[in-house]
Image: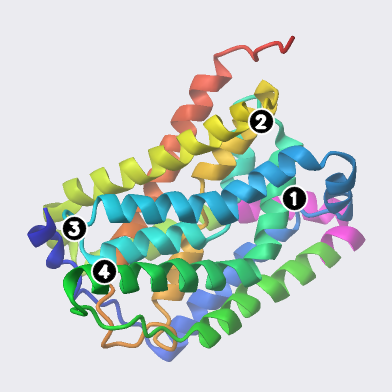
Amino acid sequence: MHESLIALDPVRINFSESGNFALNLALAFIMFGVALNIRINSFKTLIHAPKPLFIGLFLQFILLPVITFILVIVLNKVITPAVAMGMILVAACPGGNISNFMTSLSKGNTELSVTMTAISTVLAIFMTPFNFSLWGGLYVNLLNRMAGNMLQPLEIEYAQMFETVILIIGIPVILGVSFSRYFPKASLTLKKILQFLSILFFFALVAVMFSNNWELFVKHIKYIFLIVFIHNAALLLSGYTTATLFKQPDRNRRAITIETGIQNSGLGLVLLLNPDIFPPETAIGGMLFITAWWGIWHIISGLGLSFYWARKPLTVEN
């Protein structure tokens, strides 16, 4: 499998400067839509009922990267470093906004889901660059010890990544929260439209990526599928297990599980396609394929789990 995945690494999707600007603008607009769900009361919930939120945030920003790091080490002999870095990047991204719909469908705690998405989105301004830098750097250093310094050091423009995350998350979140506060009725309508557009945007972006690499994608999808399946399943399972260990009610377990397994991989793709963050000479094909397929698969797995739970009555806690 390793030899087959090597063919993906040289793949590079080049956008013009105007194309990259359009990508950043589109994702910023989507993050504005996510921010329409954010209410100041969401943060007050931390004071009144902090336990489920802290569990969710612990999973999102600490346990997910740790589990992913362990997973890429276990799979080291069957994946390339670029594929591993793609998995680490996905784990460093915040939760995706479609998780709120999935939680509602699954009879989970939708308010908890929305609050977790809101807070993780705000924290991602700092935590996404930090986690990718930390765990990506540890992975490269560990592989160099194992392989005798055969890998190049991780030379990613983290300052540029931080700046980009500020622009496409930080500013839209501030604008979205303000809009939601002063125009509550309009925000209710707009956020439904933007949720649909966010999915459309992601699929359009993936279509552009694969249009010139379709044969390569078809040839290697079975390997990418298996890796993403294992990764996503591990995250979903860790969410459910952790919520259960902390004795959360069934509604909270469902919300926390879905939030843990649904990542904003659209953010990951936009970061990967920014030449100021990942220079053209960087072999990121494996990262692109993993991140792109993650965005497709987590919708399938999340909806599948949601439909299963929708048919299953909530467990009554003693």
Q: Does the magenta run of residues contain 186?
A: yes
> Which residue corresponds to the image point at 38% horizontal and 49% vertical from the top-left?
296
Depth order, front residue of 32/155: 155
Disc 2 crowd, CA 10 A, few/some/many (<14, 14-19, 20+): few
Along the horizontal axis of the image, is 260 left or right of 84?
Answer: right
Real-space Cα separation, disc 1 to disc 3, in angstroms: 37 Å
Residues shaded magenta = 179-195
User: If you read the primary sequence from the N terminus, does the residue marked by circle 3 or circle 4 appear first?
Assistant: 4
Q: Amino acid at mark 2?
A: Phe
Q: Secondary structure at mark 3?
A: helix
Position of 214 with respect to 109 (left or right) is left
Tell me which residue sits at (21%, 74%) in the image: 11
Residue denoted by label 3: 217
Which image quarter holds the C terminus?
Answer: top right
- Residue type highlighted by circle 1: Thr
What secondary structure is the magenta-colored segment mainly? helix
Q: CA distance from mark 2 to mark 1?
A: 36 Å
What distance separates the C-alpha of mark 4 from that of mark 1? 49 Å
Query: x, y percentage for residue 79?
Result: 20, 57
* Residue at point 41%, 40% (across, down): 234
The stretch drawn in magenta includes residue 105: no
Q: Which residue is mark 2?
A: 246
